[in-house]
Image (cartoon, rainbow, N blue to C red):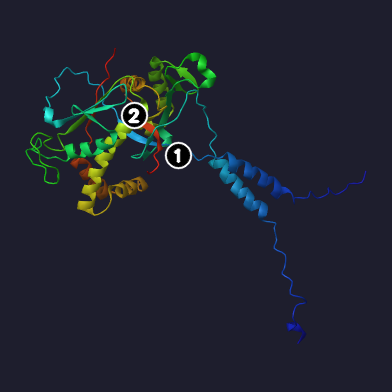
Amino acid sequence: MAKRAAPEVNAGSMADIAFLLLIFFLVTTTIEKDKGILRSLPPIDDSQTEPPIIKQKNLFTILVNRDDRLLVEEELMDIKDLKQAAIDFLDNGGGVNAEGESCDYCRGKRDEASSDHPDKAIITLKHDRETTYGRYIEVQNELVAAYNELREREAQRIFNRSFASMLEEKEKNQFNKDEKLNDEIKRIKDMFPLKLSEAEPDKN
Amino acid sequence: MSKFKKKKGGELPAISTASLPDIVFMLLFFFMVATVMRDNSTMVENTLPAADQIEKLKKDRTMFIYAGKPSAQYSNLGTEGRIQINDSFVSLDAIQPAVFEYIASLPEELKDRIVIALKVDEKTNAGIISDIKQELREANALKIMYITGKKSEE
């Protein structure tokens, strides 16, 4: 048989096929972005040392009961007032910290009966086993918001920029560390250290 | 001066579409690479609570733990909150081995930066979260993230 040249394949419909595939992938793609509240758990402490005694006035106690109601410092409170109450408590600055310095950046009432210094102020959260998770997250969210608001205020005052933008810049430059920026962030964080302790819910 | 005589007619030359498939293929490859097929389906109800003080999750070092009441198709398991890791319901004791297994699969430089992402239904009892957190503390995986939806501004 005589050798025949293979007929050329028409490639005109290639674009159509590619478009079809393209549209399929466009539709099925979900670029998932998970976001949430980042927290650190306390490590397990096996040592038998007595925990340091903390003055009652440096504790901000929040109880959430099984009906999702809040008891803050022995008083019933609505969730929307929690952030302001936490800010008032943290920002009080009524006394001195462990080094004997008074809080020169606090703008609170300097009430003797409330927290001494943001360094010492501890928020404790206790919830019932039957509290709903949604309410638990709401409370956590309000508390983180209180800290963020105070840090934001200090960042504006000292560095004249928002704390969020500083964190964003740090995130962007995570491969070439900017020591100055890290120090600045650390300074703000140390002004209002996040001290949130969570008690184990009672087992019953 | 015939050299400069005007072209006949004012017709536009047809644009060549020969490179169209190339462009489309380029886009196609981009989406093929960027697509992540959902690798596990949730067997528990999963309506996330909303929050506004949120941070981004670093996916490369994250292990997911789901919790909530079993979804309609597994309703024979009751309505009590359940824990799901990697496509199966597990008991509390199975959390620690799962965490260690996950840590072992991480590249060396991320091993001590593991983040546990908790995707928990908002109607679950918070007690189960305490139990999970206690297990995680014992496994020494201390960074956790409560995955939340974004709260719409009111």
Residue B129 vertical placement versus B62 (above, below): above
Is residue B143 among the parts visible in the rendering? no
- Label 1, label 2: how many angstroms apart (C-alpha)? 23 Å
Give coordinates of residue A82: x percent, y percent. Answer: 25, 35
For the residue pair B67 and A86, the one nearer the viewer reads as A86
* Quarter occupied by residue B110: top left
Q: What amino acid type should be assigned to the residue bearing mark 2?
A: Arg
In the image, A162 versus A75, the foreground residue is A75
Chain under label 2? A
- Residue A106 is situated, as x and y percent measured from the top left of the image, at 14, 44
N-terminal of the pair, mark 1 or mark 2, is: 1
Give residue B70's position: percent from left, percent from top: 48, 20
Instruction: From the image, state whether disc 1 or disc 2 is nearer to you.
Output: 2
- Relative side of B42 to A147, left or right: right
Residue flagged by tag 1: what amino acid is it? Lys
The mark tally for this picture is: 2
In the image, farthest residue toward the bottom: B1
Residue annotated with mark 1: A33
SS for tag 2?
helix
Q: Looking at the rendering, which quadrant does residue B94 occupy? A: top left
Instruction: Kindly identify which residue carries mark 2.
Output: A135
